């Protein structure tokens, strides 16, 4: 694949997270839309371009991958803890976990401060896009990095598994030629292979994604939300985001609008669908009027693009080193 296309995909995954999160934030807690498109005008009108915790953590993760030339969980944990602005809509569990890290609790233990078995929320999946693109060509590193970044806040096997599934979906999207039609079953098969051994619940959910994609007539958002979920738990939201991407892979806009139309945890489902769609189609597929409306302060849109380019440069550097060995 041409280098420019890969670069476009890196930026697409990061900005796709940002756009999906910002579009979904006004619909957090909403009921599913009556159809996939009837709320699209409403969704676009309510688009303030302001991101939430999903994007804040994805940006910190990207920055950390660049600075550490890979994933260093101890340093990443401290960066998450220092960079957290609770007003961005963090879950209370995440806030307490990050507080514990700031107070000196080891990152390996912090996520058990709140839930002894660890959280299985979707917080580790929502931010994982940079891992997905950075390791798209190295699946064992992809799984390792997705797991380690998850353990910091979501050490329950389903919390970790959701992050690995989402990273795998972003990686498979990044590996695909953007013009190639990703037939649902072929894409899902590649994701199954890339995600390796994660909890059984995700394998069952992927079967349901496939069944919904081939069901005729197409199911309404409410039915998809019932079958796949739209909740804050990872098993009940990560597969839903993948479905939203696959039913509209031809259009970044429709994939994200569809994800937000599921309601519920709309910012995170939007962020995850946006990450996959952005990694598949590249940043140029994100509507320009949406990109223009993104907040652009100190850690806003331009910062996000610069970081994504640095991550791409770091990836390229790794390739060059591999090739000279
Ligand atoms: Mg959020």
Image (cartoon, helix red, strand yellow):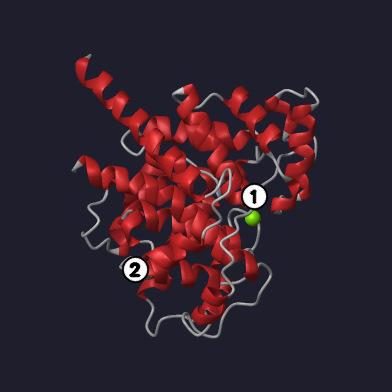
| Residue 264 percent across, percent down from the top left | 64, 68
- Answer with left or right where residue 189 lies relative to residue 239: left
Q: Is mark 1 within 8 Å of ligand 1?
A: yes
Location of mark 2 (residue): 251
Q: Quadrant of the C terminus?
A: top left
- Answer with left or right where residue 75 lies relative to residue 307: right
Residue 153 picture quarter: top right
The dot on residue 276 is none
Q: Quadrant of the N terminus?
A: top left
Q: Is mark 2 within 8 Å of ligand 1?
A: no
Q: Return the residue nearer the eye: 160 or 288.
A: 288
Q: Return the residue nearer the eye: 284 or 125.
A: 284
Q: At 24% from the left edge and 23% from the top edge, which residue is drawn?
A: 320
Q: At 32% from the left edge and 54% from the top edge, which residue is drawn?
A: 282
Q: At 57% from the left edge and 34% from the top edge, which residue is drawn?
A: 149
Label 2 environment density (alpha carbons within 10 Å; few <14, some 14–19, many ≥20)? some
- Answer with left or right where residue 310 lies relative to residue 111: left
| Residue 189 percent across, percent down from the top left | 33, 53
Location of mark 1 (residue): 53
Marks 2/1: CA distance? 25 Å
| Residue 132 percent across, percent down from the top left | 42, 42
């Amino acid at each position: 694949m041409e280098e420019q296309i890969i670069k476009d995909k890196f930026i697409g995954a990061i900005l796709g997270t940002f756009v999906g999160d910002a579009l979904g934030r006004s619909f957090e807690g909403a009921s599913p839309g009556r159809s996939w498109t009837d709320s699209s005008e409403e969704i676009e009108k309510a688009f303030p371009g302001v991101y939430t915790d999903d994007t804040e953590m994805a940006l910190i993760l990207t920055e950390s991958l660049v600075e550490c030339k890979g994933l260093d969980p101890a340093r990443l944990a401290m960066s998450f803890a220092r960079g957290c602005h609770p007003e961005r809509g963090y879950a209370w569990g995440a806030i307490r976990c990050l507080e514990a890290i700031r107070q000196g609790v080891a990152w390996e233990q912090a996520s058990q401060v709140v839930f002894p078995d660890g959280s299985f929320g979707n917080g580790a999946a929502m931010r994982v896009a940079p891992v997905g693109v950075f390791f798209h060509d190295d699946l064992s590193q992809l799984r390792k990095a997705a797991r380690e970044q998850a353990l910091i806040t979501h050490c329950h096997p389903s919390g970790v598994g959701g992050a690995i599934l989402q990273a795998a979906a972003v990686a498979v999207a990044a590996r695909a030629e953007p013009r190639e039609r990703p037939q649902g079953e072929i894409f899902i098969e590649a994701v199954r292979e890339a995600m390796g051994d994660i909890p059984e619940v995700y394998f069952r959910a992927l079967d349901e994604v496939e069944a919904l994609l081939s069901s005729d007539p197409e199911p309404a958002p409410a039915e998809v939300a019932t079958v796949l979920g739209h909740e804050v738990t990872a098993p009940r939201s990560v597969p839903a985001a993948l479905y939203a991407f696959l039913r509209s892979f031809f259009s970044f806009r429709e994939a994200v609008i569809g994800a937000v139309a599921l309601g519920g945890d709309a910012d995170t489902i939007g962020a995850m669908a946006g990450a996959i769609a952005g990694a598949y189609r590249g940043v140029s597929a994100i509507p320009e009027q949406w990109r223009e409306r993104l907040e652009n302060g100190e850690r806003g849109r331009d910062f996000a693009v610069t970081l994504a380019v640095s991550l791409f440069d770091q990836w390229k550097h790794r390739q060059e080193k591999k090739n000279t060995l």
